Image: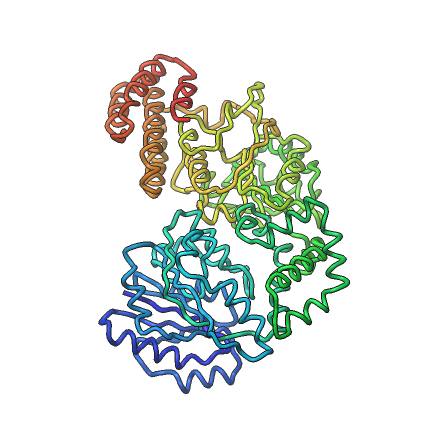
Amino acid sequence: MLSVCIPVYNQPVAPLLKALLAQFSTLGQSFEILLADDCSTPEIQRMNAADCPDDSHIHWLQPGGKMGRAALRNFLGDAAQYEWILFMDCDVLIDNQEYINNYLKHFPQADVLVGGCAYQATPPAADRLLRWSYGRQREMRPAELRNQHPYASFSSFNFCIKKEVFRRCRFDVDFHDYGHEDTLFGLQLQAFAISVLHIDNPLIHTGLTENAAYLSQSLEAVRKFLCQPVFRQAETIAAIKILRWYQYCCRWGLKPLLRGLWNGFHPSMAWQLCGPAPKMRLFDLYRLSYLCSLDPQVVGQEYGGKEVPLISVIVPYYNREACLPACLESIRIQRLRPLELILVDNCSQDGSAAVCRQFQQANQSDDFRIVLLEEPRQGACKARNAGLKAASGQYVLCFDSDDVMRRDYLKRLRRILGHMGAPQLLACRFRTDRGQLLPKHMRFDAAQQLIDPVVMTHNVCLRRSLLDTAGCWNERLDRWQDLEFGFRLLLHASSKRWINEALYTVNTSADAISARSWSDDADKLLASLEAIRQDIAAQPEAERPRLTAAWCFKLVSLAASLYREDACHRADDLYCQALSSLPDSHKKYRLLLAAHYGYTKRGGRGFWRLAAAAFH
């Protein structure tokens, strides 16, 4: 029933294992204890091998090299076999005989349980007082207070999580050392609307770092704020106090003052913090002034060598020899560098691949990286996913091979995405080659996406982390895959922004997929609607009725299109299915669906405007 996962690094764990076995022996529960050593010193490894209990429930896993804090937790969680996983640090003391039982009693109440941490009341030796003081004053809080902000208060030090939830929410493997992987995991839980309950079931933190080493770790964690793109996200800034203050300092012009404070007084501040009475407000000022003293560009170079592109543009193509040159030239002249362009050949049979090879040979440079890929499985979604896998940019932009960018398109995106607090999803408008401005409205709402789509594959720039939560393109879909993908993005994106300008032109050529018959592709269109219905089923219960009602509207739209192509019998069946699928709380929309069907099947246009107002 319970898998206990313990990442081990430079700590003897025999006492902890004996305490856990003693508690499980009285409960009669199925359990396992999984441990993995992250390259501890040979002495510690020999000590654990000699002293740890020889019990069939204890399994030492071999990660095959140093993995880091986050990756090691993922490794252990993947190996767990039971329904619930208990993660605990290795430098802990269990002083509560009901520790395991307390978790078991609360399993029905939430998907994630956080037990909290405690520190011994007796102060440690003077050379470890800073870490102890910080823990007592900032981390040691009762469950009542932590439940006021359950996601922001998340800590991986001591928590239980359902195995099925852990498959969706992962620790960020970019975090190898000390600093804020807990915060990002809590934000993931919030994005997925996972229920989190804090309980008073603490472990005592015994592994106190020496003062000087803890100061060094804290400054290294601060440096991450300037080199990791995730710390420029609005939701991350809101969750980390020092980042909020840094943003204020940038906005109010206080960085030079804090930089001068660091340059002139940081030795004095460190001396006080390592003394007999460290002050936490001074510790905050110490870290904030250090952050203000750093040059973001220099820090980024230290961590990455070559500068990582802000945006990777992914262009899949299939038999586009005639229009590819215009598309590629519009990307070449963009005023954004460094830039990564990934061209994915999706089984072309004309000279498209040769056009791309020539373009690469003529334009490849240190700040304009051009990658050529081949995707042997036909399908736009497969090609886009292949490009995404190869992309290294902080953001990804999928662009169609027959469209043309405005010269300042990517520069406009950079103005927003290159700053702290940038959104997860940034959308723009576009014009067709016939002059039409689309989309017709700019409502970031999943229900409105079904009524009249606003998020399409080619008009949004996405942060990579959003795709980690929302998922990539559904490769089983051949029609309306943009509709389903945009619907998922709007369900999961925590921060969104519009650019109310047409930044590129779309070619509405006769051979485009949109020109194909509704009747010929009815099964493929219905497959996308079924995928959307499954997306809706995964949402919290309170959100499902409104989304389902919007889904019924989209089904009626398809029915009306089929009716206009003389597939009347099938159209009527889909209309009846839509009426029967309406949630009881939205039966008032039956008249709306009837009017929509009657008007649109006879060639009427624009009924979505009335529906959009009804769902607004």
Nearer to me, 577 or 571? 577
Looking at the rendering, in which quadrant would you find the N terminus? bottom left
Direction from residue 411 to residue 143 in the image, left or right: left
For the question of whether residue 400 can be seen, the reply is no
Residue, x 57% and y 18% (percent of image)? 434
Identify the image quadrant of residue 228. bottom right
Instruction: Count all numbered tags in the image, as a single digit.
Output: 0
Residue, x 44% and y 67% (percent of image)? 117
Direction from residue 525 to residue 321 in the image, left or right: right
Nearer to me, 409 or 73? 73
Nearer to me, 104 or 323? 104
Colour convention = rainbow
Residue 531 sits above or below residue 270 on the image = above
Q: Position of residue 47 (x, y in %)?
A: 45, 85
Q: Position of residue 510 (x, y in %)?
A: 50, 22
Looking at the rendering, in which quadrant would you find the C terminus? top left
Residue 198 sits above or below residue 37 on the image = above
Residue 166 sits above or below residue 352 on the image = below
For the question of whether residue 230 can be seen, the reply is yes
Residue 476 sits above or below residue 294 on the image = above
Q: Position of residue 311 (x, y in %)?
A: 61, 44
Q: Position of residue 252 (x, y in %)?
A: 69, 45
Residue, x 55% and y 69% (percent of image)? 133
